[in-house]
Image (cartoon, rainbow, N blue to C red):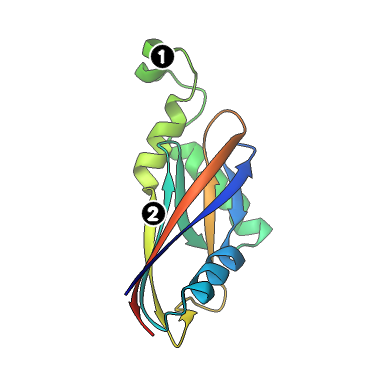
Amino acid sequence: MTYSAYIDIPTRGFSDIIDITPRVEAALSESGLTEGLLSVFVIGSTATITTIEFESGVIQDLKDAIERVAPRDIPYRHDGQWGDGNGFAHVRAALLKPGITIPFTSGALTLGTWQQVVLIDFDNRPRQRRIALQAVGER
């Protein structure tokens, strides 16, 4: 059986990191599925879905690491072509990918004790993000 749902979230951009675990868990619960896989995918090319311990120190560490890998303040060819200044956001999102797949058992996500599902919006302005969820499994 397959179940699909969407989550809409406003973001601030500039590596805004939002814990979406409760909303993902609620969608899985609504599905009625107990065993299977859940795909969590952000629609767009300047954001990512990943997991991390949602704690202020590690959140800042991640933001700092992302800045070192794809700095905001260097020239990007995308910016020259489109003039929108978000070339860094496209590169960051491409490196981290738009989605993840999470197994679930007994109706619960198979996450570690300190592991949360997060949306990271890299764009250079606030956005309304849409996340597609698709669960495949059994009742």
Cβ–Cβ below 8 Å for labels 2 and 1? no
Q: Circle 2 — which element?
A: strand
Q: Which residue is drawn at 40% across and 32% down?
A: 90
Neighbor class of circle 2 (other Cα within 10 Å; few <14, some 14-19, many 20+) is some
Relative to 3, residue 46 above or below: above
Of residues 10 and 62, the one drawn nearer to the viewer in this rendering: 10
Q: Residue at x 44, y 78 (%)?
A: 110
Q: Which residue has dot 1 on it?
A: 82
Which amino acid type corresponds to the residue marked 2 in the rendered image? Answer: Gly
Relative to 96, residue 112 above or below: below
Residue 130, given in percent of the width and then of the height, sits at 50, 46
Neighbor class of circle 1 (other Cα within 10 Å; few <14, some 14-19, many 20+) is few
Of residues 59 and 39, the one drawn nearer to the viewer in this rendering: 39
Of residues 135 and 84, the one drawn nearer to the viewer in this rendering: 135
Q: Which residue has dot 2 on it?
A: 99
Residue 16, given in percent of the width and then of the height, sits at 61, 43
Residue 115 seen in this snapshot: no
